[in-house]
Image (cartoon, helix red, strand yellow):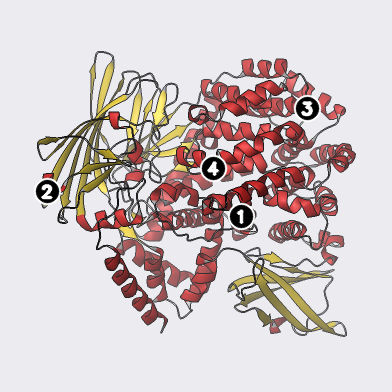
Amino acid sequence: MKKGLLTLFIVAFASYFQAQMKSPPRVEQGVSYELAQFRKNTLSGIRYELSLNIPESKSERIKATEILQFTYKKQDEVPLQIDFKEEAESLISVSVNGKAVKPVLENEHIIIESRFLQPGANEIHFTFLAGDAALNRRDGYLYTLFVPDRARTMFPCFDQPNLKANYTLSLTIPEKWNALANGKLKETSIRKGTKTLNFVASDLLPTYLFSFAAGDFKDFTAKIGKEDSKILYRETDSVKIKNSMDSVFTLYRNSLAYYEKWTDIPHPFQKHGMVAVPDFQFGGMEHPGAILFQNSTLFLDKNATQNQLNSRSNLIAHEVAHLWFGDMVTMDWFNDVWMKEVFANFMADKSTGAASDKSVYDLKFLTTHFPAAYSVDRTLGANPIRQTLDNLKNAGMMYGPIIYNKAPIMMRQLELLTGEENFRKGIDEYLKKYAYSNATWPDLIRILDQYTDEDLQSWNKVWVNDPGRPVFDNEVQYKGNMIDQFTILQHPEHGKEHKSWPQEFQIALFYPDRVEKTEVKISGRQQEITALKGKMKPLFILQNSSGIGYGIFGIDKGMLSNFSLVKDPVNRASAYISLYENMLGGTGISPQDLLYFFTAQLQNETSELNLRLIMGYISGIYWEFLPESQRIKESENLENTLWKALQVQTTKNNKKILFDGYQGIFQSKKAYDNLYTIWKSQTAPEGVSLNDEDYTGLALSLSLRNNNNNDLLQEQLARIKNPDRINRFKIIMKAASSDQKTRDDFFKSLSEKQNRTNESAVGAAVGYLHHPLRQQTSISYLPKTLELLQEIQKTGDIFFPDNWLRSAFGNYQDPKALEIVNQFLLNNPDYNKILKNKILQASDNLRRAQKLVK
């Protein structure tokens, strides 16, 4: 029945689409869905041949030529739209099939009249000045970042994911520079201080995956498989390079081997290659043959924490997974951008988990994905995993914790629902059927539907097409000292719709001498757990003890006084997360009581991931949910507790977590003097390892508590040797300055696009501007922060709007800040829905603070 309904839906959708395509697409900004579908039906065999002359100075324009070849199905007199989001004067000349034509640039599209085109093969030549918007030109280097629709800002193209093409690239660059691209390097020639690198044609790629990097990079070569593979980098710390380079390549090889075995598909592209980018605005980007990575995540010293090591292994595994999921099989339209991300994260978890036992994998999965997913899904601005998209110009707004963190949780539940073997068979069929092509989420569901009797359509609606999460509670009836009836109930956190989330999780009963665990598979709004009938009454019950269930799980208050019985780190992590989520909801425990509970665990919690989790919660509660008077009262006691725990903990990583937590919350003069001595002498506390970046962070923490911090910041600037880190610090130190005019001028400068180009540094700087210790003056920046949001979305990369908002609003509790948000939304009733949701997401804790701060 369900398969027949799905077929009818597909036929109906196809008929609807054909009806919609009777009229030609309008010439409008961006890439509309109608334009994309029209071009998909009329274009094939696309090839780009690009030649770029890149000067050393980032202020000089890049001269370029392009040959665009394609096969065309002519549609009467309908003109062809080629995307190019640049000024008209950047388009110098155009010739179509050997005939020069007048360049016509309208609403971000080059218009080629039908009379110049012919059925079948066509060739268009362009001479132009390349746009800089997505070239990320820095001092001494550049790198392209075209996701999701920014290739059109650099060169004329068909900028949509379902028109894959081959790219032949030629770069003329300063002789001392190095470069890397999707294709293999074919030949190099040197002439008068420049060199020209010609690369072979790339594999079939969508425009957002076409990429190159060029600049004053060093390079390192190692074997991946039988091929010599290169990484470009600018890191100057030789100790980090020596400590990291072998690990980076080993992690890459291990991930590659795992995916080749799991998918039964060899590496799908012609080469491997990596670029480590300073201040990269993403963690990584999966361009085949030229994967970009954040420099600071790749290169670690010998004192790296487990969290840093996990982040590096996860990042590499994630980007390598994309070679199959996203690069080889690509979404048809960016409403399914989450598909490539969910598979990359899900497979990265599998890949890295294969090297550890199940409990380690479960703990990492739980602490990585659940708090991040909840940070959005709990809010009034929560978005579903799969969203609608009318125009690719809006695609960048669709990224966030839901697709990166809720989606892997969903996928794990889907695997449990269908069974691991059936799930793998379905994915195998999907990959092989759509290799080097495009697919949609319904395409995958249709395939998986053949491998299970479960109702995937109903399951898909609540998990994928709807936002939000369930609230779980239980009702227990006892007969004497025995459980007579145990019932689980669930309802949506927001709204009145009656729905339930089918899923599996675990319930644990804790006794003085043992723990009894029961696996639960729930499918409705209310379900009796007959397996618990007849069990002895426990000291307390922990719902979702395995941590794989998704939602808010009620808290048994008996757990707080008997928490020493919770020996399993996964059980503890699940309990910590549930306590925090219940606190935010105003149920079960107050912010102050939870702060006391978490600080009491600091000496006892041995798991590094759990310690980092509760330290983050302590910081959040302290700054966001305690009134200022209470913070001042609690400060010294909290400082002393942290410092004592630092002495008690035995591992260097745990000590480092506590030291970072201490410098994040301190307010007393005693603590300031202690930390200033550590910074000034560059002598870390016993058992704590601090590197140059740690001392930079410490200098910034001290500067927030120093009313005349110019000398301190200047001394720290003089200590930094790496030129890229110097540039970063110069941006951030303006935001951290004790001089209000300096801060005012810095914030005012952010209205100009050119002052926001280093988005990583700017995001960090905005966080310092709006630190709780500076909010009496920084609150005046909030209206302009909201006013700039649409411009930032148009000019920035995909993660920057969310980063911009969270860095600004993340720590406020002042009712005036909420009034600014509410007034802005009231004054803009027709505001972009996705951006409105991001505002609601970023201000959610501010909204909750109005009830929780007492």
- In the picture of the structure, the residue carrying the numbered disc 3 is 705
Number of dots carrying numbers: 4
In this rendering, position of residue 81 left or right of residue 607: left
- At a point 68% along the width and 59% down the height, the residue shown is 570
For mark 4, give the secondary structure: helix
- At a point 32% along the width and 46% down the height, the residue shown is 159
The numbered mark, 1 or 2, whose residue comes first in the sequence reads 2
Q: Do the residues labelled 2 and 3 touch (CB within 8 Å)?
A: no
- In the picture of the structure, the residue carrying the numbered disc 4 is 801
Q: In which quarter of the image is residue 498?
A: bottom right
Q: Do the residues labelled 1 and 2 touch (CB within 8 Å)?
A: no
Q: Give the distance between the C-alpha atoms of the residues marked 1 and 3, in whole angstroms.
A: 31 Å
**Is residue 692 shown to the viewer in this render?**
no
**Is residue 395 shown to the viewer in this render?**
yes
- In the picture of the structure, the residue carrying the numbered disc 2 is 121
Q: Give the distance between the C-alpha atoms of the residues marked 2 and 3, in whole angstroms.
A: 67 Å
Across and down, in percent, residue 686 comes to 77, 30
Q: What residue type is labelled 2?
A: Ala
The numbered mark, 1 or 3, whose residue comes first in the sequence reads 1
Q: Residue furthest top?
A: 192
Q: Residue 376 carries which label?
A: 1
